[in-house]
Amino acid sequence: MQESVIYQDILQKGEQRGLQKGEVAVILRQMRRRCGAIEPEIEQQIRALSITQLDELAEALLDFSSQSDLVNYLANISPAQSNQ
């Protein structure tokens, strides 16, 4: 059973979701520490990002000094990209 294509697909999707949740948690924690509370709609935008986008955001946030930097960054990500 563990060698079946369906099982492997389910396992891979579960791993990706876990990785994405972990990255979101770290990014939110870092932004809260740097800028204070994050608006719920901004948090939702972050949760909707792909793993690749989360990786890019994690690096970019090192240069952020305020929540407006985050808002501007998210505004420049096209909606089509967030579904990758």
Image: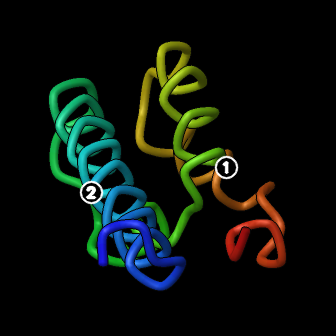
Q: Earlier in the sequence, mark 1 or mark 2?
A: 2
Residue positioned 53% across, 45% down in the render: 54
Residue 17: percent from left, percent from top: 35, 65
Instruction: Please tell me how crowded label 1 is: few (under 14), some (14-19), or many (20+) other residues with Cα within 10 Å.
Output: few
Task: Classify residue 67 by image quadrant.
Answer: top left
Q: Position of residue 12 (x, y in %)?
A: 44, 63
Please say if 63 is above or below 18: above
Left-right relation of 22 to 61: left
Report the front residue among 76 and 18: 18
Quadrant assignment, res 82: bottom right
Give, as a three-letter code, the residue at label 1: Asn
The three-letter amino acid code for the residue at tag 2 is Gly
Q: Quadrant of residue 33?
A: top left
The label shown at residue 72 is 1
Q: Secondary structure at mark 2?
A: helix
Determine the CA span between mark 1 and mark 2: 27 Å
From the top left corner, tell me how far across and down residue 63 is, in percent: 55, 14
- The residue drawn where x is 56% and y is 36% is 57
Which marked residue is nearer to the observer: mark 1 or mark 2?
A: 2
Q: Quadrant of the C terminus?
A: bottom right
Instruction: Indicate the position of residue 1 as horizontal and vertical percent values.
Output: 30, 78
Task: Write the residue at 45% across / 77% down.
Answer: 4
Placement of 80 over or under 64, stated as above or below: below
Name which residue lies at 32% across and 38% down: 27
Label 2: how many residues lie within 10 Å, few (<14), some (14-19) or many (20+)?
A: few
| The furthest residue to the bottom | 6
Q: Nearer the viewer, residue 16 or 38?
A: 16
Q: Which mark is residue 13?
A: none
- Left or right? Give the position of 10 relative to 83: left
Give the numbered dot on residue 18.
Answer: 2
